[in-house]
Image (cartoon, helix red, strand yellow):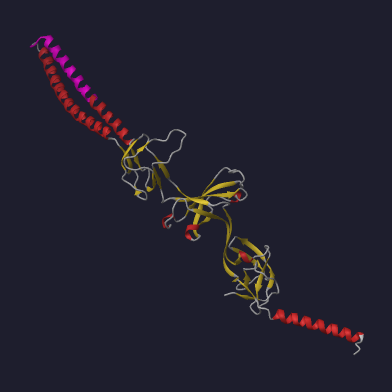
């Protein structure tokens, strides 16, 4: 059968039409792409800066203590984890010799007081006798010599009385010296806190740390009622931060829970660590320290410093934002994905404020990284 050129062209066009129809049918019947979506909502958005490296929960007070003299541990009335009061004894070295010396000195004081009382009574008697002798001598009833002896004896006994009192004071000073030496054998809590660590056992010898050579503290005491976070902030962000600014503390140990906080100090110098960005240390205190859970010093923590805050504004999850200027929207009346240009305001890693381009309750895609997600694609919201 002879096919004319016109017929050949018609056959080619018909074939192309069939192929395009087949492609269209295949695409139109292809399963839609599952995407994660979130609604545009009303809420709060904060502009924040965060620490560049992990911060650390620290205590306001911490004392790593060791006795100022060496000796054998004789008493260890506390254990790790105990809560102690200010002035409570944490550790005591063997000091029986000093205790015995103290008791002996206190007994010496008792004896010296008794001797002083005796000497002073005799001085009063001698003074009375001297006064009577002077009166008798004035009347010519006794000679001058006995009168002079009586006056001299009274003075001597008064001096003996004064010397005995000085002896008592000297013994009391000696007691103060011995008690000071006894205190050097004891470790007392300088503040109320919790015993974090004890490096020593009963009967062990401890020695003071040599100058310039750090050693483990015998007792490590922390004030767990006063906590803050020390965190490094990039030098670029540091000028934006002011003391008393509000912040959030995020603790990994508490499922990234946010604790309201406030900046209490900003370092006045920049840290220059080798092979690392230059940073400025900040201290951030918990606002409600009395309601904290079992917070322990040493926990890793992150800090979000709130630079600005807008309430009751349109917002979307920041993960839905594409290249900072558009989002993918799933319309309510069909399943074809749309690309929407938007205008944004404040933004952080969690939420971005929407100034224009979206309305409340519209659905934006938060899984744009999935294969095939683009404008015009057929999609379905995953449940």
**In this picture, is 359 found above or below 61?**
below
Residue at the image point whose x is 61% and y is 75% from the top: 381
Residue 293 lies in the magenta stretch: no
Residue at position x 88%, y 83% in the image: 9
State whether residue 23 is above or below residue 81. Answer: below
| Chief secondary structure of the magenta portion | helix
Name the one closer to the observer, 186 or 304: 186
Q: Residue at x 71, y 79 (%)?
A: 27
Figure quadrant of the N terminus: bottom right
Q: Residue furthest front?
A: 1
- The percent position of residue 23, horizontal first and vertical second, equals 75, 79
Along the horizontal axis of the image, is 28 left or right of 268? right
- At a point 43% along the width and 50% down the height, the residue shown is 226
Q: Residue furthest bottom?
A: 1
Q: Which of the two residues, 2 or 357, is positioned nearer the viewer here?
A: 2
Residue 174: x and y in percent read 28, 28
Circle count: 0
Magenta includes 142? Answer: yes
Q: Which contiguous range is marked in magenta?
A: 141-166
Q: Quadrant of residue 16?
A: bottom right
Residue 70 in percent (x, y) is at: 36, 34
| Quarter of the image with the C terminus in it | bottom right
In the image: residue 201, left or right of residue 322: left
> Foreground residue, 2 or 308?
2
Q: Position of residue 336 (x, y in %)?
A: 68, 76
């Amino acid at each position: 059968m002879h096919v004319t050129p016109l017929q050949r062209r018609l056959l080619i066009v018909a074939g192309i039409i069939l192929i395009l129809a087949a492609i269209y049918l295949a695409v139109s019947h292809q399963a839609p792409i599952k995407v994660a979506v979130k609604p545009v909502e009303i809420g709060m958005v904060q502009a924040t800066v965060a620490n560049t490296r992990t911060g650390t929960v620290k205590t306001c007070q911490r004392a790593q203590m060791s006795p100022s003299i060496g000796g054998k541990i004789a008493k260890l009335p506390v254990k790790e984890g105990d809560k102690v009061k200010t002035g409570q004894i944490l550790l005591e070295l063997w000091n029986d010799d000093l205790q015995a010396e103290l008791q002996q000195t206190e007994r010496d004081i008792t004896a010296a007081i008794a001797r002083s009382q005796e000497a002073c009574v005799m001085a009063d008697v001698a003074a009375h006798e001297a006064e009577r002798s002077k009166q008798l001598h004035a009347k010519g009833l006794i000679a001058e010599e006995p009168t002079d002896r009586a006056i001299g004896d009274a003075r001597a006994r008064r001096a003996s009385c004064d010397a005995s009192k000085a002896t008592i004071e000297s013994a009391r000073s000696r007691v103060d010296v011995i008690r000071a030496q006894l205190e050097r054998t004891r470790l007392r809590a300088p503040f109320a806190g919790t015993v974090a660590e004890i490096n020593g056992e009963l009967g062990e010898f401890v020695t003071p740390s040599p100058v310039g050579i750090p050693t483990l503290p015998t007792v490590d005491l922390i004030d767990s009622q006063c906590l803050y976070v020390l965190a490094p902030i990039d030098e670029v962000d540091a000028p934006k931060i002011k003391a008393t600014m509000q912040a959030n503390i995020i603790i990994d140990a508490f499922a990234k829970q946010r604790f309201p906080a406030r900046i209490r100090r900003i370092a006045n110098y920049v840290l220059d660590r080798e092979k690392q960005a230059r940073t400025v240390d900040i201290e951030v205190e918990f606002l409600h320290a009395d309601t904290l859970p079992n917070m322990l010093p040493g926990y890793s923590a992150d800090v979000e410093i709130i630079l600005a805050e807008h309430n009751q504004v349109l917002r979307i999850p920041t993960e839905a934002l594409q290249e900072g200027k558009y989002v993918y929207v799933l319309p309510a009346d069909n399943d074809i994905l749309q690309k929407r240009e938007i205008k944004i305001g404040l933004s952080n890693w969690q939420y971005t404020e929407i100034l224009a381009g979206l309305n409340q309750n519209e659905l934006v895609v938060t899984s744009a990284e999935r294969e095939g997600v683009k404008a015009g694609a057929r999609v379905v919201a995953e449940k």
